[in-house]
Image (cartoon, rainbow, N blue to C red):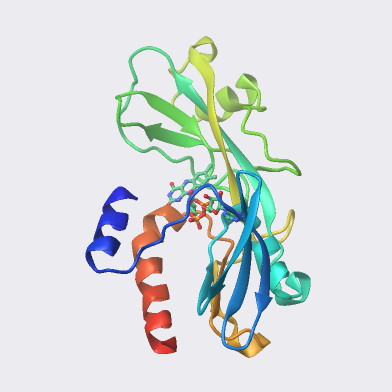
Amino acid sequence: MDHYHREARRKGGADPLVLDTEVTGLRKTGDGYQVEMVSGGERFSVEARVVINSAGLHADSVAEMAGIDVDEAGYRIHWCKGDYFSLTGKPPTRMLVYPPPPLDEASLGIHTVPDLTGRLKFGPNAYYVNEISYKVKSSRDEFWRDIVRYLPMIEKKDLQPDMSGIRAKLQAPGKSVKDFVINHEEGKGYPSLINLIGIESPGLTCAPTIGKMVGEMIEELL
Ligand SMILES: Cc1cc2nc3c(=O)[nH]c(=O)nc-3n(C[C@H](O)[C@H](O)[C@H](O)COP(=O)(O)OP(=O)(O)OC[C@H]3O[C@@H](n4cnc5c(N)ncnc54)[C@H](O)[C@@H]3O)c2cc1C
């Protein structure tokens, strides 16, 4: 992020960068949007010619603030959590190992995740949640049963709850897979509003390319 911010500054385009600030309202004005925000209890607003909504788990709420009917648009986000367990002791592999076939349709299955410190993690699984809590809730048993299908030497006692993440899924529980939405909302009556909704894996890997794509959309607008 530091790199991108420095690059943007060098090109003269990133200031002011406002961090730790929540968008609480989005109102269409003559040729742009009034964006209401709150930071440290202080409320303020800015006029924006272009709005890019990339609010992750809350991108549907931000789209709704503008006036978009998120259910009609198919933008309702379902939070889908994934837990990780880490392995104590020497990892039996430093490779990415995926179970065939995928264990369920909301994830690729619990696979190995070598990290930069030389540790090996396993995860993520996938279960839908209604609240944002990053506490690992899955059981060691459940993880171990899946892992020993492809790494039978792993002992249950060597698995420790590690971390979790929450995916912003457009795919509702029990429904079929839905892809990312990257859309300029002119057709819905919101010119210069670009929505990025349901950017789940591989959203991180794709981030530079998504950024480029959105940049090109903006160049066309200005
Ligand atoms: C368990 C798990 C495993 C994953 N594995 C991979 C992987 O292997 N490879 C891969 O490429 N991707 C992976 N991903 C997906 C990747 O993490 C996401 O696609 C990526 O982080 C999405 O980036 P984003 O910028 O769209 O959203 P986020 O990173 O969620 O950023 C959204 C930001 O918006 C802010 N925000 C929200 N609401 C408001 C508001 N009202 N006002 C102001 N700010 C707001 C949030 O605070 C946050 O900072 C994984 C995700 C999970 C959960």
Which residue is located at x 50 percent, y 77 percent? 50
- The quarter of the picture where the C terminus appears is bottom left
Which residue is located at x 67 percent, y 49 percent? 79
Question: Relative to residue 109, is residue 93 drawn left or right?
Answer: left
In the rendered picture of this protein, how many numbered marks are placed on residues? 0
Q: Nearer the viewer, residue 170 or 41?
A: 41
Measuring from the top left, give residue 163's x and y in whole percent. Answer: 53, 29
Q: Nearer the viewer, residue 176 or 52?
A: 52
Measuring from the top left, give residue 191's x and y in whole percent. Answer: 58, 86
Q: Is 170 drawn above or below residue 29 in the view shown?
A: above
Measuring from the top left, give residue 36's x and y in whole percent. Answer: 64, 64
Which residue is located at x 54 percent, y 42 percent? 109
Q: Is 11 drawn above or below residue 18 in the view shown?
A: below
Q: Nearer the viewer, residue 216 or 136?
A: 216
Measuring from the top left, give residue 107's x and y in whole percent. Answer: 57, 48
Q: Is 144 drawn above or below residue 17 in the view shown?
A: above
Question: Relative to residue 65, is residue 162 drawn left or right?
Answer: left
Q: Residue furthest left?
A: 10
Asked if one can make out residue 176 in the rendered structure from this viewpoint, the answer is no
Which residue is located at x 63 percent, y 84 percent? 190
Asked if one can make out residue 120 in the rendered structure from this viewpoint, the answer is yes
Q: Nearer the viewer, residue 108 or 132?
A: 132
Query: Residue 96 occupies which quadrant of the picture?
Result: top left
